Amino acid sequence: MERMEFAARLRAVRERGPLVQCITNMVTVNDCANILLAAGASATMAHHPLEVADAVAGVQALVLNLGGIDYQEAMFIAGKEANRLRVPVVFDPVAAGFTSLRRETARRLLEEVQFAVIRGNASEIRALAQDKGGGSGVDVSAADAVTESGLPGAAELALALSRRTGAAVVLSGAVDVVAQGERVLFLRNGSPTMARITGSGCMLSALTGAFCGACPDKPFEAAAAAAAAMAIAGEEAERLRLRKGTGNATFRIDLIDSLFNLTEEQITQGVRYEIYQG
Amino acid sequence: MERMEFAARLRAVRERGPLVQCITNMVTVNDCANILLAAGASATMAHHPLEVADAVAGVQALVLNLGGIDYQEAMFIAGKEANRLRVPVVFDPVAAGFTSLRRETARRLLEEVQFAVIRGNASEIRALAQDKGGGSGVDVSAADAVTESGLPGAAELALALSRRTGAAVVLSGAVDVVAQGERVLFLRNGSPTMARITGSGCMLSALTGAFCGACPDKPFEAAAAAAAAMAIAGEEAERLRLRKGTGNATFRIDLIDSLFNLTEEQITQGVRYEIYQG
Amino acid sequence: MERMEFAARLRAVRERGPLVQCITNMVTVNDCANILLAAGASATMAHHPLEVADAVAGVQALVLNLGGIDYQEAMFIAGKEANRLRVPVVFDPVAAGFTSLRRETARRLLEEVQFAVIRGNASEIRALAQDKGGGSGVDVSAADAVTESGLPGAAELALALSRRTGAAVVLSGAVDVVAQGERVLFLRNGSPTMARITGSGCMLSALTGAFCGACPDKPFEAAAAAAAAMAIAGEEAERLRLRKGTGNATFRIDLIDSLFNLTEEQITQGVRYEIYQG
């Protein structure tokens, strides 16, 4: 993936303004809508089982967030309809290993819906790849947190899930791992304060939907570019936080603002990534 | 409607502090509560079918937001009880033309509940007035967006819905159209960034509930004044955005703040409106 | 309770980082998660009846917020499981006296779940203590608002509920009353703008969960320290609001930020409290 490609993917979102449907949780649904609007996309959060098939027919991407477990029936209907209409589907397996209800629902979703991208933290990706429990609520467990020495293992984990599902897999952490087929990319952008707000992960998944909607034939590139855009916006928000002495609430606002104002130059110059050779 | 009347309606909200009940969607429910509090009103978001009749008995206005389609049973119970108790009811037909579930629910609500005010974008008002589909998710469709040359058509659309329902109708867009009976008012305030946050419309509908609650016998004036207050707050937030170089997230905060701090002088001097003569 | 104890309780939250589960309402759920993260705790908002027992097994505290009345089945399951596992449970009886559904649900929760702390406004505490209606939506009714001369009565009310339930009781108002057994503490921190945002109470209840999770054997001290931390953060946010001329939306952001940045010195020096001798 070329350096220019990251900015090109953001440009496509702004030019095409994809409408993205998210079936998601009430905790971060407002943030997900606003990050989509910040990126130049549009948002619909319809989740009623009697209307999601209708809605999917009018959108460019669908995002299923396991935090919206109350709407699991709608997730299956919408996911299958999106597959039928060739609308790309992103899966965020929020807390997939934390409860057996989520583990079971995630397993069934992987069986019945073809995903373009799956994005989660290391505990969540591990829960899907190995079909086992783990994680600390919605957060990564300490044992799963990606360290420099653990990167090859994280890459293998993501690749395993990608091979099993056909999806591009984004394993988010201090270093983000993007994997599909034989390709693995490590992304070294971001800020530690992203873990001190709720919704960093959910927002990235929503944004990944926008990038896929604008570029449905390149899920790997879309996912990598979305992760880079979010992480670079996070770096800008962190600079603002340190300068202003503010906290996590202002950081959240600045994060969305920074994506709103993100330039293609900022991405091209700011992205720090490497291709992993295995 | 006199220029001074707009400020007088805001003053009434602040003096009377109406309690407004919203049955609404999870995407923007927090914003709706905070805009009500910013205006000097109070908010309750109770939506359980077993308690909304109880709640309606204690409030000064009720707002039904079709985005809260999960709570449609509660909407019918609360709407009818509000009619019985002569509590004014505002309807926001969010995405009314986007799915058949919403179209059908909106149609039944119009049949069974008498609304004081109906407020939506052009696609939503068209969906109700002509009982047909349209719209792009929660957004107006490009074909429906109100242009200067399209204003007479928008006025006719709003009047048609008003005549059929008896409600004052607010058709929100670059120019807002407020119509009831034979009266039409064009309101030329607002800012383009309002379309880059989720909740601009929902917040205006909630605020319209507050203005109706403080002034239940004048729905046309209440609706026009609420739209003016919101749009003028939007202009102030836009000035701040341009000066600070911030994005849509800060805009949302500044929008609510601007309403919190809005003076009667700002409204009286800032409102740009004209009476449409047909 | 010693002055140093307030800061020590906050330090424990930051050192132990308890995971707090909230079963709560959609209006303020995002704020509750972010205030927990601001304090150095973690948050999970799982509320599905089929997973809450699983979730409770992995957390250090549980918060039941009556605003999440849609999830009442989950509240009973989670509350009982938390009792079984000796995970402290906080109850926020939002609008407990406003509808008969809430009154009845609150009564049953008090019968079936042992709470470590119950926190509400005067109308809510009165509704529980006297098993009667009252309140103005989610707000305290004018008749119930705590005044200086009404403080002894508020103390008696809180003590009565504490004796009946065994819980520490926090009655929030212009002066906060914390009561358990024979002990009563008056806390004189806070800012009037806290009543102009939605979620001040919900956030304090969530935060109380964090303090209990970090200090499960001292509910009185945990509750008092949480209330002090929140109120002192509110004072800091008020100072910022007056200096910047901002409104309630920025106040909310500054409130969470202020808790994020709150130092132990600020608490120790800022807390204004007295032991009530009855």
Image (cartoon, coloured by chain):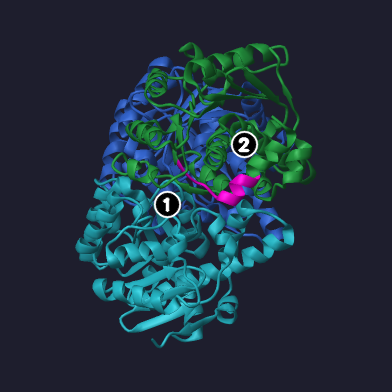
Chain colours: A cyan, B blue, C green
Q: Quadrant of the N terminus of chain A?
A: bottom left
Q: Residue at x 67, y 31 (%)?
A: B7
Residue nearest the observer in this picture, C62 or B195? C62
Which chain is home to disc 2? C
Is residue C23 highlighted in magenta?
no
Disc ID at residue A137 = 1
Q: Position of residue B188 (x, y in %)?
A: 59, 47
| Percent x, y of residue A138 | 43, 54
Q: Is residue B269 left or right of residue B53?
A: right
Residue C41: x and y in percent read 55, 48
Q: Which mark is residue C226?
A: 2
- The crowding category of the residue bearing disc 2, from other C-alpha atoms within 10 Å (few below 14, some 14 to 19, many at least 20), is many
Q: Is residue C273 above or below residue B185?
A: above
Amino acid type indicated by mark 1:
Gly
Question: Was residue C12 drawn as part of the magenta stretch in this picture?
Answer: yes
Q: Is residue A147 left or right of residue A98?
A: right
The image quarter in which residue C109 lies: top left
Q: Helix, strand, or loop for circle 1?
A: loop
Which amino acid type is shown beneath numbered disc 2? Ala
Q: Is residue A28 visible?
A: yes
SS category of the residue bearing label 2? helix
**Residue at 45%, 57% in the rendered image:** A139
C-alpha gap between disc 2 and disc 1: 22 Å
The reply to whether dot 2 and dot 1 touch (C-beta < 8 Å) is no
Q: List x then y, in percent, for residue C221.
A: 62, 32
Q: Which residues are magenta?
A: C11-21
Would residue B190 be seen by someone viewing this image from the given angle?
no
Which quadrant is home to the C terminus of chain A?
bottom left
User: Relative to residue C38, is residue B268 depicted above or below?
Assistant: above
Q: Of the numbered discs in the image, which one, if any, rests on residue C220?
A: none
